[in-house]
Image: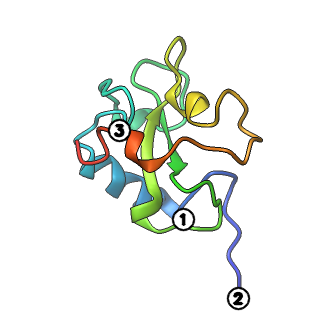
């Protein structure tokens, strides 16, 4: 049976998202800004969301998950999609300097 998750979610209860957050030692995968665990998908300081590295929203493996900041002016998640979340084009995995913290 297929399990449908909200757009952008990797796992029910966000276990994969939080595992990626821990792997990155609370740093944004692109810019290195400090993220706050409790501010997942919130519009406050340290806000972040999970990003599918290879652009495939059905590939919900931890190895395909990177945590990115979502507040302006940086908004690395938006940058990762070249400014358009509907774009299939994403930046290459080699650009995620803080993938491992």
- Report x, y in % for residue 87: 74, 41
- Mark-to-mark CA distance, 2 and 1: 15 Å
Name which of mark 2 and mark 1 comes first in the sequence. 2
Q: Nearer the viewer, residue 63 or 93?
A: 93
- Residue at point 55%, 22% (across, down): 43
- Mark 2 lies on a secondary structure that is loop
Name which of mark 3 and mark 1 comes first in the sequence. 1
How many neighbours does mark 3 have within 10 angstroms: few (below 14), some (14-19), or many (20 or more)?
some
Q: Is residue 52 above or below residue 4?
A: above
- Report x, y in % for residue 84: 73, 32
- Mark-to-mark CA distance, 3 and 1: 16 Å
To which quarter of the image does residue 91 belong? Answer: top right
* Residue designated by label 2: 1
* Residue designated by label 1: 12
How many neighbours does mark 2 have within 10 angstroms: few (below 14), some (14-19), or many (20 or more)?
few
Q: Assign the N terminus to one quadrant of the image.
A: bottom right
Q: Specify whether 100 is left or right of 2.
A: left
How many neighbours does mark 1 have within 10 angstroms: few (below 14), some (14-19), or many (20 or more)?
few
- Mark 3 lies on a secondary structure that is helix
- Report x, y in % for residue 19: 33, 57
Q: Nearer the viewer, residue 88 or 22?
A: 88
Q: Specify whether 22 is left or right of 84.
A: left
Name which of mark 3 and mark 2 comes first in the sequence. 2
- Residue at point 41%, 64% (across, down): 62
- Mark-to-mark CA distance, 3 and 2: 31 Å
Q: Assign the C terminus to one quadrant of the image.
A: top left
Q: Nearer the viewer, residue 58 or 79?
A: 79
Instruction: State how the image is colored.
Output: rainbow
């Amino acid at each position: 049976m297929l399990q449908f998750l909200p757009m952008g979610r990797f796992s029910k209860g966000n276990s994969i998202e939080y595992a990626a957050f821990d792997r990155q030692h609370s740093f944004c995968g692109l810019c290195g800004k400090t993220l706050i665990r409790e501010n997942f998908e919130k519009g406050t300081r340290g806000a972040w969301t999970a990003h599918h590295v290879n652009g495939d929203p059905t590939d919900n493996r931890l190895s395909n998950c990177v945590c990115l900041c979502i507040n302006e002016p940086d908004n690395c998640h938006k940058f990762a999609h070249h400014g358009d979340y509907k774009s299939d084009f994403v930046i290459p995995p080699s650009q995620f300097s803080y993938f491992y913290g």
